[in-house]
Amino acid sequence: MAMAACTTTNTKVALGADQAPPPGARVLLMQPDVQLGLLTASGITEPRADWSQAGQSNLAQEIQAQLSTRSHTLKVSDPDSLMEGRQGQLLRLHQAVGESVLMFNYGPFRLPTKPGFDWTLGSGTQTIAAAQEADYALFVRGQGSYASGARVATAVGMSLLGVAVPLGEQRVFASLVDLRTGRSSGST
């Protein structure tokens, strides 16, 4: 799996030539999972369904536009429709592996002897390849919080006292899986 993550809104992560699917590849885009919320003055994030739906739609449209400019055959799928049987097991395995990659490569439990990642879902991904007529699967998950006006005011007030107050955070996790092998077409 080629995976990328970022924690700022200004960071763009793009697949290099050795990581992107070859032209003409059939790419199965799993409907992006986006969760956005409003960070209140007290630091609690209130989920915003309208923001999340808009983010999901916008992200899916942009991914589709980017892949179509590279001559890929694109199929969009809702992960919920694939949750039965072997395909469902592989999707849940992908979620567990993805969370491990984030935790051990970008989170608090970084592995000092493993600077990059070399993960696989195994050859069982051929089940999805055959059922969905795809060569690759692209998974994207985003989470974010944005500061309310009260949170900004709190941050300004606390900065006068020398205390830093976070104003929100955005994270994006993308994973490109070669469905013939279960491995990445490169690494990030």
Image: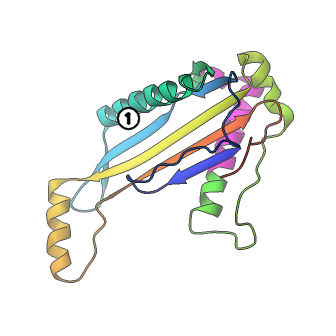
Q: Is residue 103 magenta?
A: no
Quarter of the image holding residue 130? top right
In this view of the protein, which residue sits in the foreground, 172 or 165? Answer: 172
What residue is rendered at 46% in x and 43% in y?
Answer: 142
The magenta span reads 81-98
What residue is rendered at 60% in x and 43% in y?
Answer: 15
Quarter of the image holding residue 112? bottom right
At which x and y percent is residue 62? Answer: 44, 30
Q: Which residue is mark 1?
A: 55
At which x and y percent is residue 164? Answer: 28, 75
Q: How many marks?
A: 1
Which type of secondary structure does the marked residue at label 1 adopt? helix
In this view of the protein, which residue sits in the foreground, 80 or 78? Answer: 78
Q: Is residue 153 left or right of residue 97?
A: left
Q: In which quadrant is the N terminus drawn? A: top right
At which x and y percent is residue 51? Answer: 31, 36
Q: Name the main secondary structure of what is drawn in magenta.
A: helix
